[in-house]
Image: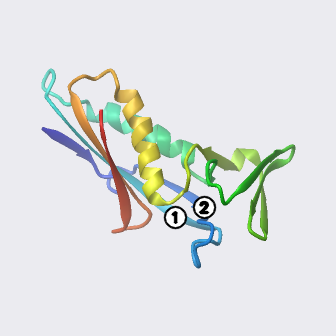
């Protein structure tokens, strides 16, 4: 059995900006409205795989944490990140950005490309579902626009 949440229709979205160092176009600061879609596979337990409301709340909380933030990959070796008194200083090649701390989501990933965002979000969801033994597989897709996105599958 499986259940699905469509990020666009279910309003599981967030708007953020990021940059991909070294990319000719995406190397400039730019933004997207992202949608997070989820598919859970497993065995029924008390008529349900999981309550839709419960799963939607988990995903919505993650989206809210990323919404209207500058997404920065802490582990990206192409970035020099300094925690300064007045914000985060980010150096990428010859460019230097200074962002107020409350505007930044520092993520423990190597890149803010959709592929890495999908794994980050999938791991966050999976950690909250770890006690549910009836769940087997989690698929998360992060779209950075209608019709284009990247996904990740985890065993839970």
Query: Front-most of 24 and 5?
Result: 24
- Give residue 87's mark: none
Q: Residues within 10 Å of mark 2 (few under 14, many from 20)?
A: many
Q: Nearer the viewer, mark 2 or mark 1?
A: 2
For this view, does 44 lie left or right of residue 107?
left
Q: Residues within 10 Å of mark 1 (few under 14, many from 20)?
A: few
Image marks 2 and 1: residues in contact by CB distance under 8 Å: yes
Query: Front-most of 62 and 81?
Result: 81
* Coloring basis for residues: rainbow
Residue hosting label 1: 32
For this view, does 107 lie left or right of residue 50?
right
Find numbered disc 1 in the image and state the secondary structure of the residue it sits on.
Answer: strand
Residue hosting label 2: 18
Query: Front-most of 56 and 72?
Result: 72
Q: Quadrant of residue 59?
A: top left
Q: Where, quadrant-wise, is the C terminus in this rendering?
A: top left
Residue 42 % position (x, y): 18, 33
Q: Which label's residue is closer to the chain start, 2 or 1? A: 2
Q: CA distance from mark 2 to mark 1?
A: 8 Å
Residue 68 % position (x, y): 60, 53
Q: Is residue 55 above or below residue 31?
A: above
Name the residue at 12% across, 25% down: 47
Name the residue at 13% across, 28% down: 44
Residue 41 % position (x, y): 20, 38
Kindly tell me whether residue 51 is visible in this rendering.
Answer: yes
Name the residue at 55% across, 56% down: 111
Q: Quadrant of residue 91?
A: bottom right
Residue 121 % position (x, y): 44, 44
């Amino acid at each position: 059995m499986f259940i699905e949440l469509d990020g666009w229709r279910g309003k599981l979205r967030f708007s953020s900006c990021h940059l991909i160092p070294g990319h000719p176009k995406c190397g400039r600061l730019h933004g997207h409205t992202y949608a997070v879609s989820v598919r859970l596979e497993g065995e029924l337990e008390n008529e349900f795989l999981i309550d839709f409301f419960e799963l939607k709340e988990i995903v919505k909380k993650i989206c809210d944490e990323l919404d209207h933030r500058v997404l920065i990959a802490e582990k990206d070796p192409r970035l020099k990140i300094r925690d300064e008194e007045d914000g985060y200083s980010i150096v990428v090649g010859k460019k230097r950005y200074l962002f107020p701390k409350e505007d930044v989501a520092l993520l423990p990933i190597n890149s803010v490309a959709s592929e890495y965002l999908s794994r980050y979000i999938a791991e966050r969801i999976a950690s909250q579902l770890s006690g549910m033994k009836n769940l087997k597989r989690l698929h998360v897709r992060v779209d950075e626009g209608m019709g284009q996105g990247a996904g990740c599958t985890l065993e839970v």
